[in-house]
Amino acid sequence: MMLPLVTGAVLSGALMGWEMLSASRSVLDPRDYARLRVGQDRSEVEHVLPDRQTIPRPSATEPKGRGITCEYYAMTADRFDDRSGNAYRLCFRGTCWCHSTL
């Protein structure tokens, strides 16, 4: 009778741990973001970008245009932070950083 409860608790804990680890690898430090400038080449900004993009994406529409791609990076990995779920959106046109939103 206790086995399903214990199994559920262990799985829930493991999933929360995995989520926190994944989130921490997608956080763009606010100081690094503040140093970025629109118009920089991607090769200039790559060294401050996290390993991964964040999975939750804001619902705002992305800029449209030929060659524009957007990437999303979390503001925080702390689930209890007011910024939890918010992301930086960096859009590139080719290799040039062309647009950003919070």
Image (cartoon, helix red, strand yellow):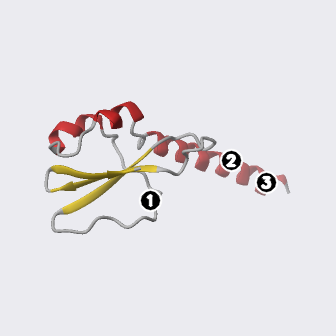
Residue 17 in the image: above or below residue 85: above
| Residue located at (65% from left, 51% from top) | 11
Q: Percent position (x, y) of residue 31?
A: 38, 30
Q: Residue furthest top?
A: 31
The Cα–Cα distance between marks 2 and 3, rounded to whole angstroms, is: 9 Å
- Contact between marks 2 and 3 (CB within 8 A): the answer is no
Q: Percent position (x, y) of residue 55?
A: 44, 56
- Read off the residue under disc 2: 10
Type of amino acid under label 1:
Arg
Q: Percent position (x, y) of residue 5?
A: 79, 54
Instruction: Return the disc, 3 or 1, that comes first in the chain's sequence.
Output: 3
Total labels: the figure holds: 3
| Residue located at (34% from left, 33% from top) | 32
The Cα–Cα distance between marks 2 and 1, rounded to whole angstroms, is: 28 Å
- Read off the residue under disc 1: 57
Left or right: 35, with 1 as reference point: left
- Read off the residue under disc 3: 5
Q: Depth check: 1 or 73 in front?
A: 73
Type of amino acid under label 2:
Val
